[in-house]
Image: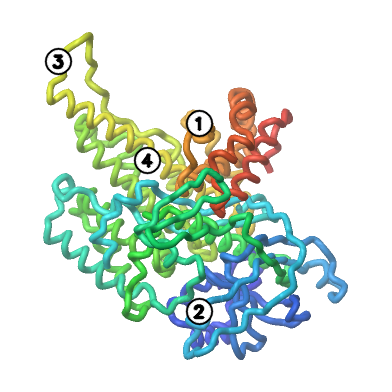
Amino acid sequence: MAGSGPVGFPCRRNSSLDSFLKRHLRQEVYDAIRAYELCLVVSDTELRTFQYVVLSDRLIYLTENPPRSIRGVVALQDVQAIDLIQDYPDFLNGLDREINQHIRIVYSLSSLKNSCGNVKGSKKLFPFPRLKGNKKVKEKNDGLLSAEHKEYGNLNDSLLRNQWPDGDQSAFRPLPIPSERSCLSTVSTGISDNSLSAMMNRTESILSYTTNPKEFQTSSDLKNFPSEMQFKFSGNRDDLYLRNVSSRVILPHNPNLEKKESELHLYIISSTSPMFLYLKSSWNNNIIQSTLLQDPLYASKFNSTSGCQKPYRSEKMIQLFSQLKSELFLKDNTLGRIACLLAELKVIAQRNFIFRKLFWKSSDLYYFLVSKLHEYLPKPQDPNAFQNKNQRADQLEACIQIIQTLGLMFRETETELSRLNTLVAKRGTLNTLLIILISEPEIPNSCPVFGIQVVTDSSLVEMSFDAKLQRLILEYTNTATALLYELLLASLQGNLGLGSKKFAVSWIMSLLQSFPPMISFVASMVKQVIKELLPSLPLLSPYQAVLLYQQFYILKSCLQHSNILAEYIRNNHKEEFRYFVHMPTLEKRLPLCYPITQTTTQLIHEVLDLVEQEQCVKCS
């Protein structure tokens, strides 16, 4: 949890407030608290009162100083903008006026439905203030959370049963997605049926501790996305909605729906407090998750992990994490078994923030996963294992699983100082990971076919494996893009804490531009985003919309922080951006109902402006 430590990280904790929150919040809600900070609060119902703002993954709370009660005041799904206002409040004096951070939160008025479910012993809803509508604030976002995978339907049902941009803007950390490929084939991986059954039973039992049916839910939560729903498009892109046989649900962010707005102002008397960045991070995580939940299949899979009845217990989470970690480190593990264990870990970590915190408490699991990637990417270290296409496909599937796990563990863990320490401690490991992410995996060559000949059964099998490998390479590239995005966000956070010489965006971009595969990686990304924005194609899926944002975010980082990459993009791809990336095309591809659409549109505008600039970028 966050205080106003000297380097902007949660170095100091308020034991009294900690104790109060632990007594009054349910265990799973307490574990999801991201940060808290003492500040002056101004709203239509609060006039310059010193209170603690408490941030969780879903709500912004306020509690008195000293704390006597706690109430949820803003649901993150209702937030329209979070701005850092550069002003000098009249009611502050001397140095306080100069070092204060004025944070303005603009949100739409709605009912905080069931918010009392987060508080122990509550029987009444906390009143949600009916505030006056104020002016709308234009928001500039620079980062979001990452999605992992588009093929949600491949998620193993048996397991599921049971930016910061440059310093003064935003920070993002999107919510993870369960893996679609939760286990590889027991035939190809060598896992026995008994072992697989045991892992499934363990996941069933532990998932019963992940959630509580009384947990806070909003009007657009998962209950509005039953698995029977399907996308329907009536011809007017403002009227995209989900439909089942008995009801029609208008999706959020429909411009035809009237929204009343209000504002919450927080004045933090500290120039080093990271609260603004944490607020942005949690809010943008909510944007990512809300976008992904508009895929009915993903929504149904996500919902399948939350229908549990037993109470949540942190001790069980710690015990299970230790058990999975011990099994991952067994010397006789096959790559397939490692992939299955990671799939189990991901399913639980998706709904339990404590798992992601535990991952960074010690660095050994991070180093282990990177070493496993290095063993098989971009080419297997064992040359004899490279010519078998079936075996190579299994290797790529397992490596995708590992990268997804790493991406999941980065999300929403910016408050963990141990994460940054791990990344800084062994630069060689980070260098290895970066090279892996930007390098295309090598695959066995196809057998050449000369002239016209009869297609034999073996040729058909060969063609099938070739097609599968190409699909896996595309899936790997998208997954690697998502993790590279997370690393860039982490490096921007590093500017806050340890300084540019140790871990910062300029440093990580200087590394990337020195790696030969980076030019090919950028070229491939430009080609992909141009293809995604062709007006003749159908609307982007929620996953594709999130991936598009991540790709443009990486391109913006290249243009802002790397002279070499910026010059390459301008010299080789300016015409492509000029003629194929424009707003009318974007409007045809991105539905207005996606919460991420406005953010993506703003980011693309910024990238286009940077591409048109002729002067060189000055890297700080």
Name which residue lies at 35% across and 34% down: 441
Q: Quadrant of the N terminus?
A: bottom right
Q: Quadrant of residue 264?
A: bottom right
Front residue of 489/578: it is: 578
Q: Is residue 356 left or right of residue 466?
A: right
| Few, some or many residues within 10 Å of mark 4 (<14, 14–19, 20+) | some
Labels 3 & 2 near each other (Cβ < 8 A): no
In the rendered image, residue 34, in percent from the top left (x then y), is placed at 54, 70
- Name the amino acid, label 1: Ser
Front residue of 132/331: it is: 132
- Name the amino acid, label 4: Glu
Q: Nearer the viewer, mark 4 or mark 2?
A: 2
The disc at residue 536 is 1
| Few, some or many residues within 10 Å of mark 2 (<14, 14–19, 20+) | some
Name which residue lies at 32% across and 74% down: 308
Name which residue lies at 70% across and 36% down: 609
